[in-house]
């Protein structure tokens, strides 16, 4: 199994079926929190749902079109992060992530994203890293700000979450802008 050490507290582990029971519990325990900004919690609740997600994620990983990892914080799976898309032709990746509510505010997502940015530029030889965030998602927008990403624009009517249609802010970071990674 692929595992990448982010720091002394955090590992990224390629998603696999062994994580399914943990994801079911996380989704159930964090349903209201996750459903505020993400569409998938309403449609992914059972072990079969998560097994299907893992199978699809591993298939896309084998095709080199995405990379979904479990975030392991102090030995416990607390969410996922990775590249929703990997586009070798455009030399661009798009990062996506979510974590449980009780571990938010510890800098975990920022550290994970720094690691993913570094990997994208150094190992995958990408020229751009992008993150798409709902306009009202203040916590995720703050992550993008801490990463030094540039606001590239707003896409209206980008996603439906529950009964709301959300606009997204697109953040980008280009290879020449790198100094810390």
Image (cartoon, rainbow, N blue to C red):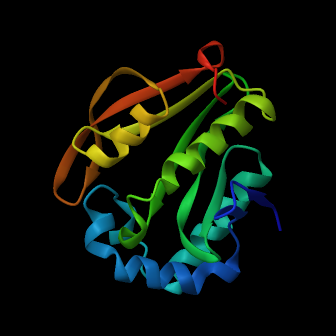
Q: Is residue 21 rendered to the left or right of residue 38?
A: right
Counting from the top left corner in percent of width and height, residue 77 is at 58, 74
Q: Is residue 105 rendered to the left or right of residue 83?
A: left
User: How many numbered marks are there?
Assistant: 0
Q: Is residue 157 rendered to the left or right of residue 170?
A: left
Residue drawn at (20%, 46%), measured in percent from left and top?
165
Counting from the top left corner in percent of width and height, residue 99 is at 45, 64
Counting from the top left corner in percent of width and height, residue 174 is at 59, 19
Residue drawn at (72%, 61%), measured in percent from left and top?
58
Residue pushed farthest top? 176
Q: Nearer the viewer, residue 165 or 15?
A: 15
Point out the image quarter for the C terminus: top right
Residue pushed farthest left? 163
Residue drawn at (38%, 58%), measured in percent from left and top?
105
Q: Is residue 98 rendered to the left or right of residue 74?
A: left
The vertical placement of 180 against 74, above or below, is above
Displayed quadrant of residue 129: top right
Displayed quadrant of residue 102: bottom left
Point out the image quarter for the N terminus: bottom right
Displayed quadrant of residue 64: top right
Residue drawn at (26%, 44%), measured in percent from left and top?
138
Counting from the top left corner in percent of width and height, residue 121 is at 72, 29
Residue pushed farthest front? 8
Q: Nearer the viewer, residue 6 or 66?
A: 6
Q: Nearer the viewer, residue 55 or 105?
A: 105
């Amino acid at each position: 199994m692929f595992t990448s050490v982010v720091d002394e507290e955090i590992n990224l582990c390629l998603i696999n079926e062994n994580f399914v029971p943990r994801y079911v519990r996380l989704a159930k325990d964090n349903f209201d929190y996750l459903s505020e900004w993400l569409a998938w919690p309403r449609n992914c609740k059972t072990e079969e749902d998560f097994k299907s997600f893992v199978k699809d994620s591993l298939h896309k990983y084998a095709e080199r079109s995405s990379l979904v990892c479990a975030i392991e914080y102090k030995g416990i799976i607390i969410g996922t992060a990775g590249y929703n898309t990997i586009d070798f032709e455009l030399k661009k990746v798009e990062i996506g992530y979510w974590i449980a509510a009780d571990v938010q505010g510890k800098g975990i997502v920022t550290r994970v994203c720094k690691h993913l940015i570094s990997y994208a530029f150094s190992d995958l030889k990408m020229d751009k890293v992008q993150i798409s965030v709902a306009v009202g998602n203040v916590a995720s927008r703050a992550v993008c700000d801490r990463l030094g990403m540039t606001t590239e624009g707003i896409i209206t009517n980008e996603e439906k979450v529950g009964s709301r249609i959300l606009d997204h802010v697109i953040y980008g970071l280009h290879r020449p802008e790198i100094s810390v990674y």
